[in-house]
Image (tube, rainbow, N blue to C red):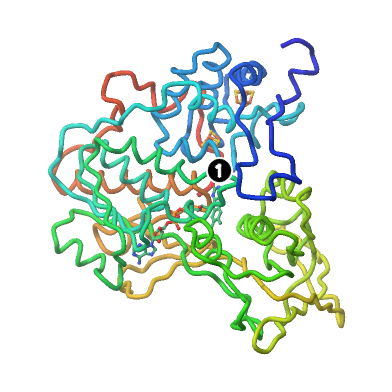
């Protein structure tokens, strides 16, 4: 470190210029060079009590890999990353970096660029090692849903020697991670991660839907010893306003999947995205890239400060030429053969509700109309439980994915588990909880002890799962 100030200032992450990056879906953030990564890693204080690790849902030893990068040991840093994180290549691009929010350097300047250093570890270290399974158990488990929760459970169980069949209704694996626009994560990241699964007994079956082609119980009857439902929240919510079925009204989730899978999408010249979360931000930024010259507005019923979208995403979006409208809530969508506009009620902040969050209420008699030819709805998602038996008594959390009602994520039906998560890394943590629950459940049935979490590379190089100084998670599922 050359000066006292530089310790508190992040080595800038290079990025594409706003006026050029909106021309196409090129990746916005560039990688650190080796030298930049070492300098950034050297800012880390190597805290005895690693708040960064405690904030990471999968307890990734980020302090450890940062220390190794600071010493220029990129191979060891890549190893330490991959040993606990099979979706590292994905996460180094898209994780919402809860670790950085908890980093002590945040209070003193800028937090260490922990996610970006994960990318440097994989870029400059050996990131091509294959996972190695323990001795086969000759027992199969079915995982329904190939999103991050399902993939993590498949990894955990595959490493322990189980055979795993992952059944997915879409033609591709990845779940909602497959809807993340390419300017944040180019297409191949998830495939790079999946390549490392090749030695594990994990089979993917695509294009089969639970509730239509099979049921969780039919899988048990077929001989699977347990079933993990990792079906996420794949059905878009609607705001429930008149006009929401007009031609020209589309759902953000469908739109983003279509864009990533190169399916044609029809956008107009005046686009309004309704919603304030990360999916809404992805929809406005993607619209701008697909429809050059279009006027794109994002309309949210609360303020910017209360928007659920990440600060980083909003900061990156602001210079791209998008109009933000805060404190407006859709009242009705106008049009005949196609959308022509949308009427919003003006909202104002009210005193906090029981959760401590500022409530909002309409300003009496004040509304405004925004002319548009396309409305993209990004007001959340929920699980699609069509065809799932009621006996499972699936609990649906606030974000919409189903959870088993027991502590180990088991549903009311023995042997059937369910979980998901509000981000890629939370979903992975849920997958680990489910895999631990499944292994403990099967061990009990078979009269053996649960399988300890194995050494993923099978060569005795796995560090302890719990990093030194870790005192427990600070995150909530
Ligand atoms: C546009 C967008 C951008 C996002 N950006 C980020 C980001 O940058 N960072 C981040 O951390 N998180 C992001 N997220 C959130 C993150 O992707 C999700 O939290 C995460 O994918 C949830 O994982 P999951 O495995 O629980 O569910 P999902 O990813 O939803 O996976 C569930 C899978 O189950 C399948 N399925 C559903 N029903 C059935 C059925 N009946 N039969 C068979 N298969 C079924 C679905 O097709 C899907 O593939 C984003 C989400 C979206 C939509
Ligand atoms: S996985 Fe995410 S939260 Fe965990 S250390 Fe990496 S960037 Fe941070
Ligand atoms: S909290 Fe920040 S400074 Fe401390 S070990 Fe973690 S990354 Fe380094």
Above or below for 92 versus 418:
above
Residue 108 seen in this snapshot = yes
Q: Position of residue 443 (x, y in %)?
A: 19, 43
Q: Position of residue 167 (x, y in %)?
A: 29, 58
Q: Residue at x 71, y 59 (%)?
A: 292
What is the quadrant of the N terminus in the image? top right
Q: Which residue does the image show at 27% across and 32% down from the upper left?
A: 452
Q: Is mark 1 on a helix, strand or loop?
A: helix
Viewer-proximal residue, 396 or 199? 199
In the image, the residue with mark 1 has its CB under 8 Å from the nearest atom of ligand 1: yes
Looking at the image, how many numbered discs can be counted on the residues? 1
Please give left or right for residue 323 compared with residue 466 in the image.
right
Residue topped by disc 1: 94
Quadrant in the picture for residue 222? bottom left
Residue 47 makes an appearance in the image: no
Front in this rendered view, residue 261 or 277: 261
Q: Position of residue 366 (x, y in %)?
A: 87, 79
Residue at image coords 72%, 69%:
269
Q: In which quarter of the image is residue 279?
A: bottom right
Figure quadrant, ligand 2: top right
The image quarter in which residue 238 lies: bottom right
């Amino acid at each position: 470190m050359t000066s006292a100030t530089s310790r508190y200032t992040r080595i800038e992450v290079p990025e594409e210029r706003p006026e050029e990056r909106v021309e196409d879906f090129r990746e916005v953030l560039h990688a650190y060079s080796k030298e930049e990564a070492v300098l950034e890693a050297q800012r880390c204080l190597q805290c005895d009590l690693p708040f960064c690790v405690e904030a990471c849902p999968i307890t990734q030893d980020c302090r450890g890999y940062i220390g190794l990068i600071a010493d220029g040991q990129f191979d060891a840093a890549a190893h330490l990353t991959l040993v606990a994180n099979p979706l590292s290549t994905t996460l180094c691009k898209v994780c919402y970096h809860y670790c950085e929010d908890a980093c002590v350097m945040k209070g003193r300047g800028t937090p260490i660029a922990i996610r970006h250093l994960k990318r440097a570890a994989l870029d400059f270290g050996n990131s091509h090692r294959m996972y190695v399974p323990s001795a086969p158990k000759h027992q199969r488990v079915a995982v329904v849903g190939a999103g991050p929760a399902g993939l993590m459970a498949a990894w955990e169980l595959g490493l322990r020697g189980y055979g795993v069949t992952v059944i997915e209704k879409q033609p591709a694996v990845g779940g909602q991670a497959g809807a993340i626009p390419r300017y944040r994560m180019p297409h191949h990241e998830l495939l790079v991660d999946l390549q490392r699964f090749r030695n594990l007994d994990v089979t993917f079956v695509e294009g089969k839907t639970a509730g239509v082609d099979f049921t969780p119980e039919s899988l048990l009857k077929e001989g699977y010893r347990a079933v993990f439902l990792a079906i996420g929240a794949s059905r878009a919510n609607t705001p429930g306003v008149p006009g929401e079925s007009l031609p020209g009204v589309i759902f953000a989730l469908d739109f983003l999947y279509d864009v990533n899978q190169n399916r044609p999408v029809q956008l107009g010249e005046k686009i309004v995205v309704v919603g304030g979360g990360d999916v809404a931000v992805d929809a406005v930024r993607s619209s701008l890239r697909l429809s050059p010259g279009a006027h794109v507005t994002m309309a949210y019923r609360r303020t910017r400060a209360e928007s659920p979208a990440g600060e980083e995403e909003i900061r990156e979006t602001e210079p791209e030429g998008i109009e933000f409208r805060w404190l407006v809530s859709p009242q009705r969508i106008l049009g005949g053969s196609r959308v022509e506009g949308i009427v919003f009620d003006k909202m104002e902040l009210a005193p906090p509700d029981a959760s401590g969050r500022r409530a909002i209420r309409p300003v009496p008699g004040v509304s405004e109309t925004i002319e548009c030819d396309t409305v993209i709805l990004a007001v959340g998602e929920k699980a699609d439980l069509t065809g799932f038996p009621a006996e499972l008594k699936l609990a649906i959390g606030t974000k919409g994915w189903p959870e088993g009602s027991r502590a180990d994520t088991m549903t009311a039906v023995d042997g059937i588990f369910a979980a998901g998560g509000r981000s890629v890394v939370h979903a992975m943590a849920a997958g680990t909880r489910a895999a631990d629950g499944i292994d403990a459940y099967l061990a009990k049935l078979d009269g053996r002890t649960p399988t300890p979490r194995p050494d993923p590379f099978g060569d005795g190089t796995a560090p302890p799962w719990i990093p030194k100084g870790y005192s427990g998670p600070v995150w909530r599922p």
